[in-house]
Amino acid sequence: MAIAAMVQNASPVRKALYVRSVREATVAQCPTACSSCTLHSTCLPCGLQQTDDSMDELVYSRRRIHRGEHLYRAGDPFKFLYAFRSGFFKTYIDTPEGQTQVTAFPMAGDVLGLDGIETDKHRVSTVALEDGEVCMIPFAHFQAVALRSPALLHQMHRMMSREIMREHSVMALLGGMRAESRVATFLLALSEKFAGRGYSAMQFNLRMTREDIGSYLGLKLETVSRVLSRFQATNLIKANLRSIEIVDMTGLKSLVPEL
């Protein structure tokens, strides 16, 4: 309580220094090897054998991040690859018109930071939608290990290719689909991601708001809400606030055209 009171009464400069020291202390905690992580099968070391020495060379530091806190902002220097251990996040860009465009919803097992490789600065901002934990791998260290491990370098290329394909899919999604198809595609993609991480493919919570979903899909908030209500009325899903249960997976898939 004494520390909290001292910080509360401190000047803005002292408060900023205190917050920075706490964050740096959090980042520096307990370096760990990837082979000990339960998510290594979906993260950077995916495809590497447990006996591969390069897996244990990928030493990182963990950072706890709270809901509403930014992991990094557009324009920040690029230093790390960020592997999400838990939590749900949102990436976005600020448009020249002063609007916010959501670009992705990363979750546990995803890796972010690749956007900074070209210019050494991040091009998107990433904010936590719930409390979580992220592994921070210095990119220079990752490069040194990858040069000695063809399998790890191949995984890096796979991740970059997957990101390119994701962007192409989003462009196709925003370009030619009706609102119902866009929302159905979004729900099915989430279902697949949750299933791939050992969670239920049929029932999950939406960590993002309807407004965030609309920004990502290129739809108005009212349109997203109307489509979800229509899905519920036709027994495709059950929706209760942010809880979604897919009742008719086949019916939902029938709304998605072949790309």
Image: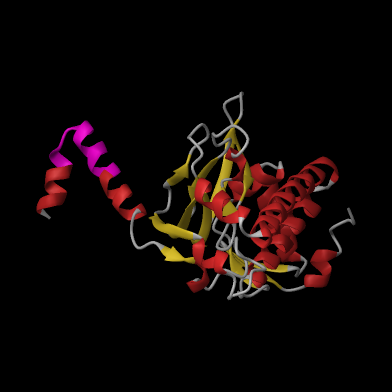
Quadrant in which residue 229 is drawn: bottom right
The furthest residue to the top = 96
Q: Is residue 86 visible?
A: no
- From the viewer's perspective, is 36 left or right of 13? right
Q: Is residue 76 magenta?
A: no
Identify the main secondary structure in magenta.
helix
In the picture, which quadrant includes the N terminus? bottom left
Q: Is residue 46 above or below residue 89?
A: below
Q: Residue at x 19, y 36 (%)?
A: 14
The furthest residue to the left = 2
- The x, y position of residue 218, in whole percent, is 71, 41
Q: Residue at x 88, y 56 (%)?
A: 257
- From the viewer's perspective, is 37 left or right of 52? left
Quadrant in which residue 249 is drawn: bottom right
Q: Nearer the viewer, residue 110 or 45?
A: 45
Q: Residue at x 84, y 58 (%)?
A: 256
Region in magenta = 8-20
- The x, y position of residue 92, in whole percent, is 58, 40
Q: Residue at x 52, y 71 (%)?
A: 35
Q: Is residue 100 visible?
A: yes
Q: Is residue 68 above or below residue 84?
A: above
- The x, y position of residue 208, in whole percent, is 56, 53
Q: Is residue 80 above or below residue 94?
A: below
